[in-house]
Image: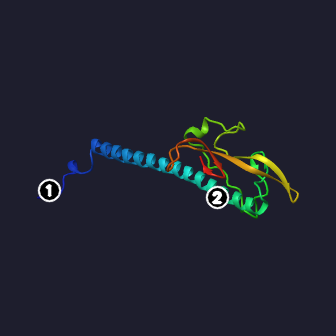
Amino acid sequence: MLQKYKNKNSGFTLIEILVVVAIIALLSSIALIGLMSAREKSRNVKRLGDMTQMNTALELYNAQNKGYPPSVNGVPQGMTPTFLTGLPRSPIPPDGFCDITSNPAGLPSNDYYYTPTGTSSLINGVTVWSDYIYYFCLGGQTGNFGPGLRILTPKGVR
C-alpha cells in the first residue's frame, strides 16, 4: 500500500508563525506612524485654512463697516451669519509646540484668539478697530511656516 500523506510534515512550525506575526506587526506599526503623521499635518493645514477663511471674512467686515470687529474673550463679534456661517474652532489635539506655549491671553496656543488693535471708532453705533491680531499655533512645519505661535494680521500670516 502507498502512503498518501504524512501527518508529520503538515502545518507550520512555531518559528514560521512567529516570523509571520513579527513581519505583520512591523508593517502595521510603520503604517500607524505614517497615519499619525498625516493626521498631524492635516490639523496644521486646517489651522492655516481657518486663518485664511477668517482673514477673508474680516476683510469683508472691514469693507462693510470701515473697521474690524470688537472682541469678547478672544472671539470676533458680529461675524456670523453675515460673513461666516460659523466661527472656526481649532482642531484637537494640540500638536507639537502648541501644547506647551501660550498666547498672550494666557490660553493654550492651540486655541484661536482674536484681538482688535489700533484705534477704535464708533461707526453706525458699532465700535470698530483699525487693526487686529489673530493668534494661532502650528504644531509642525506647514508649507513655508515653521512650528509655534503664529499671528494673522490684515497683512497676512506671520
Secondary element at tag 2: helix
Q: Is residue 125 above or below residue 149?
A: below
Q: CA distance from mark 1 to mark 2?
A: 77 Å
Residue 81 percent location from the top left of the image: 76, 63
Q: Identify the residue shown where x is 66% and y is 59%.
A: 56
Amino acid type for the residue under numbered disc 1: Gln
Q: Quadrant of residue 148?
A: top right
Taking the image as shown, residue 39 lies to the left or right of residue 83, namely left
Residue 29 percent location from the top left of the image: 42, 45
Amino acid type for the residue under numbered disc 2: Gln
Secondary element at tag 1: loop
Taking the image as shown, residue 56 lies to the left or right of residue 80, namely left
Give whichever of 5, 54 is nearer the camera: 54
Which mark is drawn over residue 53? Answer: 2
Residue 153 percent location from the top left of the image: 66, 49
Q: Identify the residue shown where x is 29% and y is 42%.
A: 14
Residue lying at the far left in this picture: please name it.
1
Residue occupied by mark 1: 3
Q: Identify the residue shown where x is 50% and y is 48%.
A: 144
Q: How is the image coloured?
A: rainbow
Give whichever of 8, 157 is nearer the camera: 157
Q: Is residue 23 above or below residue 60?
A: above
> Given this view, does label 1 or label 2 mark the residue nearer the observer?
2
Residue 112 visible somewhere in the drawing: no
- Counting residues from the N terminus, which is met first, the one under dot 1 or under dot 2? 1
Give whichever of 79, 91 is nearer the camera: 79
Q: Within 10 Å of the Cα at label 2, are there few (<14), some (14-19), or many (20+) other Cα atoms? A: some
Q: Identify the residue shown where x is 76% and y is 60%.
A: 80
Q: Within 10 Å of the Cα at label 1, are there few (<14), some (14-19), or many (20+) other Cα atoms? A: few
Q: Quadrant of the N terminus?
A: bottom left
